[in-house]
Amino acid sequence: MASAAVSHPPIAHSHSEAGHRQTPVVHNSVPQIPRGPVQASLSFYAPPTDGSKPFNYVEQPPAGEPQHNFGEHTTIVTISDVRGRESHFTLDKNAFETLSNIPESAEKDFTSDESIKKNYYPEVENLILTNVPGARKVFFFDHTIRRQDPKASRNPVLRVHIDQTPASAAERVRIHLPDEAETLLKGRYRIINVWRPLNGPVFSHPLAFADGSSVSDHDLVAIEHRYPDRTGETAGVQHNAKQDWYYWSGMENNERLLLKCFDSDESVGQQGRVPHTAFVDPRTPANAPGRESIEVRALVFG
């Protein structure tokens, strides 16, 4: 896929350039949704300085161990807006896809895991079976609610990553569906995250995602993802100027973003996985509400 054209947002004039004019303070004003291409800082993977295998602890690390042993490389990238051209992107071609006009969920609060599984999971299952070509069986293995609040258990993640690697995707099948695993692993299986805001439209910390076809396998590094009871893998992502980055401005509660983290179909090649991260949009209004979102992770067979 050709690289997106770079377009820079207008540069605001300083007070001196504007003749020292004072802007009236407007209380309780409605914040403006940032739209269009933006240049923003993204945090990419940097290897451990001692050359050791990279790792990250999901929970509290053992005494004397760091939470993770790898570093970060921060760089400015141009992030293009898919708003208005949503139909140009598909899971098979780009590893992400957008869906609009989704009916209101039966789940209202998104505070109880059991209620989410009862009310929201069936809706997401129907969404996947209806919109993902070839899908015939769906198994949800977890979900995460993120709230931009210091008191929240999960905040937006400001680090470019992919949730799975080929090894961890196959292991997911064996862990969650052991009786069917060997049969299921012989067919096509995918891991797809279904992402949506809970308090849309999104003003703050939008999600950036790279076109999978623009990301080389050489950009990806397997990281040990250490749970208390087992060790999985995620992928760190090294910056490459050839990567094409996107976001979906002002996502609403009736919109869904499908992010494909793995695809066993080798015919789609690099389009089988999508690096993603929250990012700080420098145009975010000072009075913008913090982002709240849920992502549901699914094994999709067929």
Image (cartoon, rainbow, N blue to C red):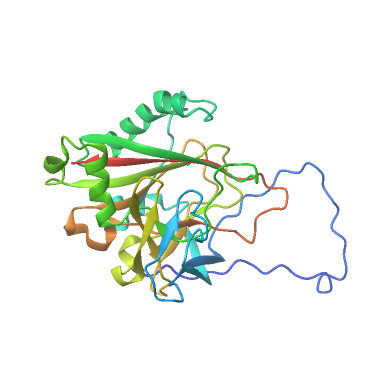
Residue 149 pos. (x, y %): 64, 44
Expressed as whole percent of the image width and height from the top left, the position of residue 71 reads: 49, 69
Q: Nearer the viewer, residue 257 or 100?
A: 257
Q: Relative to 237, does residue 133 appear above or below in the rendering?
A: above
- Asked where in the image residue 214 lies, by quadrant, the reply is bottom left
Left or right: 164 as drawn, with respect to 134: right
* Viewer-side residue, 67 vs 267: 67
Q: Nearer the viewer, residue 102 or 21?
A: 102
| Residue 78 percent coordinates (x, y) | 50, 68
Q: Quadrant of residue 46?
A: bottom left
Q: Is residue 187 above or below residue 56?
A: above
Residue 132 in view of the camera: no
The total of numbered circles placed on residues is 0
Q: Name the residue at 27% across, 63% down.
A: 270
Left or right of 134: which side holds 22?
right
Which residue is at a point 53% across and 62% down the rendered structure image? 37
Q: Is residue 79 visible?
A: yes
Q: Is residue 188 left or right of residue 230?
A: left
Q: For the N terminus, which image quadrant? A: bottom left
Q: Quadrant of the C terminus?
A: top left
The structure residue drawn at horizontal position 15% and vertical position 46%, both measured from the top left corner, is: 185
Residue 158 rendering spot, x and y as whole percentages: 53, 58
Above or below — where is 208 with respect to 196?
A: below
